[in-house]
Amino acid sequence: MVAYENPWAAGPPPGEMTAVAPGVLWARLPLRLAIDHVNVWALRDGDGWTIVDTGMHAPATEEAWEGLFAGPLEGRPVIRVIVTHLHPDHVGMAGWLTKRFECELWMTELEYLAARDATVRRDEVFESSFREFFRAAGFTQDEVAQLRNSFASFGRYYHPLPEDYRRICDGEQITIGEHEWSVIIGSGHSPEHACLLNPALGLLISGDQVLQRISSNVSVFPTEPDGDPLNDWLNSLRKLKREVPEALKPRTIPVNGVQGQKTIEAVGTDAKRMLGRTPVMMTGAIFRAAGSNISPAGWCTCNCAPWAWASANMSCKRCQWRGLMMLV
């Protein structure tokens, strides 16, 4: 494996933006989670900006955006907002931005619809499937109620989305200012995740499809209890490996603000080992928690417990699909 140096490892300080290429600015917005920030991008687009990803809806995020508009964004308008995927740390402020600047929201279809769905009250059918899903995993009735409250809280992290949007598709070329960006769709982390590739600038904005030091969260949820999202995610990494130009591969490229080429190249080697190792690591976490005094719902803080279990469930499902485990 080639050793890479990441010239952007430190990241931009709060309230500032780092230019990673001509007309491409990078900022970090605060999160009140175990991961304390999310990367967002401003791409020069004529007399204004195209914003890629938006942060989680919260007063601190609004304040951060106001500071960026008054500072490095020079008071120029937002022309459009592109969002990589549905999770609130990426789409949460999209409605706020599009309303403020009277501009369009650009997303893939499944991500837009799933984000809209995440903000509405669940009906009794969903409540029933949710309870059955986690009760089958060994959670008590009280613990299921705690998890349900964690899921229910997600809605407050989304500013209401616009009623309409502009759909983006795999392989589409988007002209932003003087540059062309290619849309590469992946899945596994979310249903129809959009990455933006600019070979001329040597940049890939990957949202959460590719990360630097960890794998993306890949989870099985009550809405598709027999899904195999890990297979989707690995296939998406193979697709990125094919579609990222060879000329880019020897270089360090900022993927969501960090080096992601290592992850893309790992598909051919490390990912094979990961397939055999992940179930042991993830299910081992379950068994350790079950043997301790910590209840399943108390594994994580900051509303992470549902994601921890859903990711572990993904690993079990992967073992089941590969014939390594039987569910009884």
Image: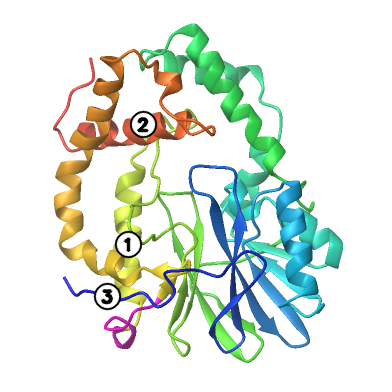
Q: Give the SS element for disc 1.
A: helix
Indicate the quadrant where residue 69 lies: bottom right
Give the image location of residue 19, x and y in percent: 57, 82
Q: Amino acid at mark 3?
A: Tyr
Residue labelled with disc 1: 237
Q: Is residue 248 magenta?
A: yes
> Magenta residues: mostly which secondary structure?
loop
Displayed quadrant of residue 134: top left
Question: Residue at coordinates 18% horizontally, 34% vertically from top-left?
Answer: 280
- First of labels 1, 3 by sequence position: 3
Magenta-drawn segment: 246-253
Residue 163 visible in the snapshot: yes
Q: Which residue is mark 2?
A: 226
Mark 1 neighbour class, 10 Å CA radius: few under 14, some 14 to 19, many 20 or more: many
Residue tagged 3: 4
In this view, the mark in front (2 or 3): 3
Report whether residue 102 is seen: no
Which of the marked residues, 2 or 3, is nearer the chain's N terminus? 3
Element carrying mark 3: loop
Q: Quadrant of the C terminus?
A: top left
Task: Examine the structure image and report whether residue 144 is included in the region drawn in magenta.
Answer: no
Q: Which-is-in-front pick, marks 1 and 2?
A: 1
Q: Is residue 137 left or right of residue 43?
A: left
Labelled pair 1, 3 in contact (Cβ < 8 Å)? no
Amino acid type, residue under disc 2 in the picture? Asp
- Classify mark 2: residues with Cα within 10 Å, few (<14), some (14-19) or many (20+): some
Q: Looking at the picture, which amino acid does disc 1 mark?
A: Leu
**Foreground residue among 276 and 21:** 21
